[in-house]
Image (spheres, helix red, strand yellow):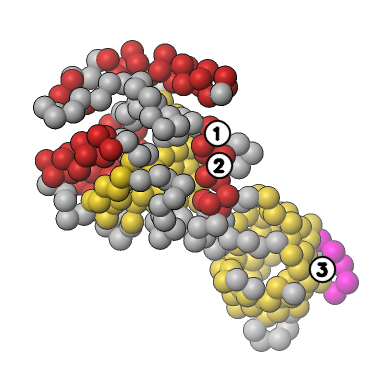
């Protein structure tokens, strides 16, 4: 409780001077005017600056094909921007009833009622598993509490958090606009374990062993009884890639798409490109 109060106090102190410069009509309407720093269920309300909202959605490569969920939607600023600037379908989840009602009115005023839905609900009880983009501005302990749910989302789902990280899950990218930080992740697929790889033409076989922690991976590839470390190994969404040195001292690059217990892709060496497949055992 003490830690949460300290974080709340720091959050208010850090952002209040910036937000005090905003004109009051942006913060509410004639029915309800929220105040910066007002307490909520687990957080205080501090709106994200417009420029950072745009940058966050750009980092996630948001398009009109995306379903964006904003966790802790406040006055609806991020879902509205996702729809109005990027053409996305968007959903905001907001616990506070008055704030959710304000967000709904803002959606109507912005002319995006056909693209944006505001749900009055709890982010830990509402289902956002179908989202392709998730945005949030929550305190660190809430990010950590959400992390297991986010990691179970479909690989390739893009996540953006204003100000706070996900602990030891390092971001794929750090953003900064007007001295404000945000962090971007792509949900990785699970590639850990032992894989049997082979060239489709039958001329090449390998045994791949991978270890994984979030999107960081490492391992070895064994070919003709000789084990080689992986170089530059990565997983991004469903995409797996690495480089290795083969027994003949040639540099090879493997790129593949993982689908559960199988993968398919290509092996490049010199000017040649061969198709490969793999199964996890």
Residue under the image location 85 percent in, 74 percent down: 224
Residue furthest out toward the right = 225
> Which of the 4 image quadrants contains residue 280?
bottom right
Where does residue 108 sit, x and y in percent of width and height?
13, 44
Q: Is residue 251 left or right of residue 186?
A: right
Q: In the rendered image, which residue does mark 1 sit on?
A: 141
Query: What secondary structure is marked by label 1?
Result: helix
Magenta highlight: main SS: strand
Where does residue 244 sit, x and y in percent of width and height?
73, 60
Q: Is residue 59 left or right of residue 194?
A: left
Q: In the rendered image, which residue does mark 3 sit on?
A: 222
Q: Are marks 1 and 2 in contact (CB under 8 Å)?
A: yes
Q: Give neighbour class at mark 3: few <14, some 14-19, many 20+ (Cα, 10 Å).
A: some
Residue under the image location 53 percent in, 32 percent down: 140
Q: Which residues are magenta?
A: 224-228
Q: Are marks 2 and 3 in contact (CB under 8 Å)?
A: no
Please give the label number shown on residue 145. Answer: 2
Q: The C terminus appears in which quarter of the rendering? A: bottom right
């Amino acid at each position: 409780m003490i830690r949460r109060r300290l974080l709340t106090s720091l959050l208010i102190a850090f952002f209040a001077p910036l937000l005090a410069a905003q004109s009051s009509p942006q913060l509410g309407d004639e029915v309800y005017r929220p105040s910066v720093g007002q307490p909520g269920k687990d957080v205080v309300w501090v709106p994200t600056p417009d420029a950072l909202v745009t940058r966050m959605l750009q980092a996630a490569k948001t398009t009109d094909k995306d379903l964006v969920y904003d966790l802790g939607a406040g006055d609806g600023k991020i879902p509205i921007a996702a729809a109005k600037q990027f053409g996305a379908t968007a959903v905001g989840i907001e616990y506070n009833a008055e704030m959710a009602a304000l967000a709904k009115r803002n959606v109507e005023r912005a002319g995006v009622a056909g693209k944006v839905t505001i749900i009055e609900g709890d982010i830990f009880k509402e289902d956002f598993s179908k989202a392709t983009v998730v945005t949030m501005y929550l305190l660190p302990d809430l990010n950590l509490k959400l992390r297991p749910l986010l990691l179970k989302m479909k690989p390739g789902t893009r996540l953006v958090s204003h100000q706070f990280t996900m602990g030891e899950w390092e971001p794929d990218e750090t953003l900064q606009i007007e001295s404000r930080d945000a962090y971007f992740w792509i949900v990785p697929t699970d590639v850990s374990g032992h894989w049997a790889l082979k060239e489709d033409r039958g001329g090449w076989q390998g045994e791949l062993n991978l270890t994984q922690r979030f999107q960081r991976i490492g391992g070895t590839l064994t070919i003709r009884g000789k084990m080689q470390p992986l170089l530059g190994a990565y997983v991004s969404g469903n995409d797996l890639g690495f480089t290795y040195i083969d027994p003949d001292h040639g540099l090879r690059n493997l790129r593949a798409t993982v689908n559960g217990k199988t993968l398919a892709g290509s092996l490049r060496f010199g000017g040649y490109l061969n198709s490969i497949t793999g199964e996890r055992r």
